[in-house]
Image (cartoon, rainbow, N blue to C red):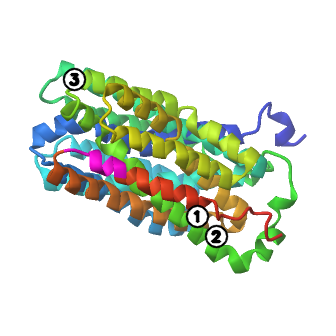
């Protein structure tokens, strides 16, 4: 009797559960908790707006470097070891940030955190293409990114609670706590992750279709570079916009709307709550209507969210913005993970996903730094949110010209 028949469920869903925890740590805690910790951290270290942006940009620059290193690391060390090492690097840097005394140390350590995030995130998203066939990739990737939303909810309640208990040192204790959580998740990943279903005598979950064959990707090879460039530019537009909001919306609530940190944390937790549904819903939508239609729908929702954030229409508009941002927060990464495998096939998925993620990393490296400079000059982030809306609106039109993977068969 094969292992496949002995199992009550496919082990791919264990990989998905591990992926939820990994993304909870490598993106949810390492990146989005920063926005919650930032107001108290800014006060404790005496950071200016532009310095806040530079620290965030340093994280994305580290992520950008990891994107270049990830394919080499995956080939040499395989996904499981690469992910585990990335999580441990994140944990060590978080513990180091908790002891920082100035801008430079925080910048260096948060840059290294970005490297760890990339080394964990890219391999775990690539695992989706190995463990699931085409008709389930969107759903599986969407379930994984639930970890991001769960981390936002967690940080939205946990960080203000710490700051109430420890008004001066709360942000430092927060970084220590996040680091220890990341260590635990690294241990789980090391124990449960598997690099390929063949290691367990399994086939990928789902039924084989014509679009799973390497013959199709070989037939499309002449246009593969153009398709990857197209996907990469779309991912760049997403990267340049979503972290402007993710980094600075809590500060906007506290400074521009005079919210208490607790109220801002509650709003930020709503982002996390609604984002729990974003990856699964848009992933399943793209499984049904195609990756192009899914991308256009996601960018449309994000455009409206950014317009409302910069509209100046008050708390009601801000609340609607938070809901919309959450509903589409992880839609683009989910669809991209599935789309790359659809277009390029399993043999090229890791390298292709790394290339499009490089574009994404460039975008998110530039976005927050530019937004910080604009805010330092204008005194608010309104202009930055409106610029983000313009860029995602352009992305809707650009996605319209993305061909389906069947088009060249």
Disc 2 crowd, CA 10 A, few/some/many (<14, 14-19, 20+):
many
Residue 177 visible in the current orientation: yes
Q: Left or right: 257 with respect to 235?
A: left
Nearer to me, 159 or 123: 159
Kindly indicate whether the residue at mark 2 contacts the one at mark 1 (C-beta within 8 angstroms): yes
Q: Give residue 50's mark.
A: none
Image location (x, y in percent) of residue 137: 70, 48
| Helix, strand or loop for disc 3 | loop
Figure quadrant of the C terminus:
bottom right
Q: Earlier in the sequence, mark 1 or mark 3?
A: 1
* Magenta residue check for 297: no
Disc 1 crowd, CA 10 A, few/some/many (<14, 14-19, 20+):
many
Nearer to me, 324 or 282: 324
Q: Left or right: 129 with respect to 390?
A: right
Give the residue displayed 54% in from the left and 46% down from the top.
300
Q: Quadrant of residue 39?
A: top left
Between the residue at mark 1 and the residue at mark 3, the CA separation in whole angstroms equals 40 Å
Which residues are drawn in magenta?
A: 380-386
Q: Which residue is mark 3?
A: 260
Nearer to me, 174 or 52: 52
| Helix, strand or loop for disc 2 | helix
Give the residue displayed 76% in from the left and 52% down from the top.
134
Kindly indicate whether the residue at mark 3 contacts the one at mark 2 (C-beta within 8 angstroms): no
Q: Which residue is mark 1?
A: 231
Q: Which residue is mark 2?
A: 227
Image location (x, y in percent) of residue 151: 43, 33
Between the residue at mark 1 and the residue at mark 2, the CA separation in whole angstroms equals 6 Å
């Amino acid at each position: 009797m094969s292992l496949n028949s002995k199992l009550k469920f496919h082990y791919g869903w264990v990989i998905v559960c591990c992926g939820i925890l990994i993304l909870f740590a490598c993106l949810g805690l390492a990146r989005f908790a920063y926005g919650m910790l930032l107001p108290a951290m800014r006060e404790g270290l005496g950071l200016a707006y532009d310095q806040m942006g530079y620290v965030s940009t340093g994280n994305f620059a580290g992520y950008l470097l990891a994107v270049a290193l990830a394919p080499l690391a995956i080939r040499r060390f395989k996904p499981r070891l690469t992910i585990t090492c990335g999580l441990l690097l994140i944990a060590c840097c978080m513990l180091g940030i908790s002891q920082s005394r100035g801008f430079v140390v925080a910048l260096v350590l948060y840059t290294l955190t970005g490297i760890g995030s990339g080394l964990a995130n890219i391999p775990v998203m690539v695992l989706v293409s190995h463990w699931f066939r085409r008709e389930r990739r969107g759903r599986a990737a969407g379930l994984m990114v639930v970890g991001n939303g769960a981390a936002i909810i967690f940080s939205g309640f946990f960080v203000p609670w710490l700051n109430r208990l420890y008004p001066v040192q709360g942000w430092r204790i927060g970084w220590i706590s996040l680091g220890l959580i990341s260590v635990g998740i690294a241990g789980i990943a090391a124990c449960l992750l598997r690099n390929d279903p063949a290691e367990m005598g399994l086939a990928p979950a789902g039924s084989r279709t014509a679009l799973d064959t390497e013959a199709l990707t070989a037939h499309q090879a002449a246009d593969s570079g153009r398709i990857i460039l197209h996907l990469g530019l779309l991912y760049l537009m997403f990267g340049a916009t979503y972290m402007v909001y993710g980094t600075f919306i809590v500060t906007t609530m506290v400074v521009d709307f005079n919210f208490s940190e607790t109220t801002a944390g509650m709003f930020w937790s709503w982002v996390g709550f609604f984002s729990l549904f974003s990856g699964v819903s848009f992933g399943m939508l793209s499984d049904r209507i195609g990756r192009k239609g899914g991308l256009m729908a996601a960018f449309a929702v994000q455009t409206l969210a950014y317009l409302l954030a910069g509209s100046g229409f008050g708390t009601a508009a801000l609340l609607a913005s938070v809901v919309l941002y959450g509903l589409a927060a992880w839609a683009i990464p989910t669809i991209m993970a599935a789309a790359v495998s659809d277009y390029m096939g399993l043999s090229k998925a890791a390298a292709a996903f790394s290339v499009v993620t490089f574009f994404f990393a460039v975008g998110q490296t530039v976005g927050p730094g530019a937004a910080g400079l604009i805010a330092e000059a204008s005194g608010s982030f309104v202009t930055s949110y409106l610029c983000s809306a313009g860029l995602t609106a352009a992305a809707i039109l650009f996605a319209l010209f993305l061909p389906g993977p069947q088009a060249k068969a």
